[in-house]
Image (spheres, rainbow, N blue to C red):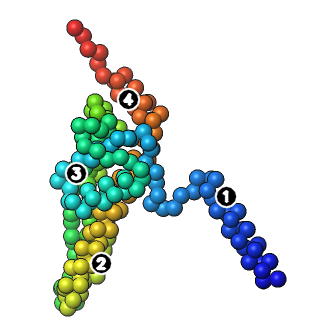
Amino acid sequence: MIRSAHRSIAWALIALSVLLTGCGFALRGTQQVPAALQPLAVDCGNVPGGLCQSLKEQLTLNGVTVIGPTQADYLLRLSSFDRQRRTSAITTTAAAAEYTLRHSVALQVVTRDRIPLIEPATLSAVEAYRYDETNVLAKRREEAALEQQLYNRLSQQIIFRLAPLTEARIRAMREQYEARQPESRP
């Protein structure tokens, strides 16, 4: 009787996984970057190395070949990185009890011939943490770990922005861009 119940549960789990796979279900954070964006260059400009490294790792995990800008068909440009650390709560003695970290970055994607695929857009990620002035070293480590989490979140947001850029959409955007350009006259 117990074996039969285990077998039924196993078959139900297999059926559920097949059903979810067939409907296009994907775990959060597993957005796929279309093959149409190959090869891709990443220009990190003034962006911290942690964010740039996180983004390149995410792209590599998504099967994107990241190469230098001179050989790439597409350029992902990051700029205007901003890091804010603000007190969000105070103690009765007017000391900081909680901080909010906010990172933001601007991104843009252009083709080799400078046709914009993603106009400049700003993405941001926010995280709060409690501060204990009696344990400053541990809180600094926690803040550094939170900064890495914010870099990872921004990287995932960038991946989500790249996901809709299929070959058909890129072709349509290119046609629209060229149609808006004034004809060259001799």
What residue is disc 4 on? 174
| Residue at 24% from the left image edge and 82% from the top image edge | 139
> What is the x, y in percent for residue 62?
42, 53
| Residue at 72% from the left image edge and 73% from the top image edge | 9
SS for dot 3 = loop
Q: Quadrant of residue 111?
A: top left
- Disc nearest the viewer among 1 and 2: 1
Quote the CA–CA distance across marks 2 and 4: 45 Å
- In front of the other: 92 or 169: 169
Amino acid type shown at disc 2: Tyr
**How would you rate the neighbour count of disc 4 (Cα within 10 Å): few for under 14, some for 14-19, many for 20 or more?**
some
SS for dot 2 = strand
- Disc nearest the viewer among 2 and 4: 4
- Disc nearest the viewer among 1 and 4: 1
What residue is disc 1 on? 19
Asked whether residue 100 appears in the rendered view, the answer is no
- Which quadrant is the N terminus positioned in? bottom right
- In front of the other: 144 or 121: 144
- In front of the other: 62 or 75: 62
N-terminal-most mark, 2 or 3? 3
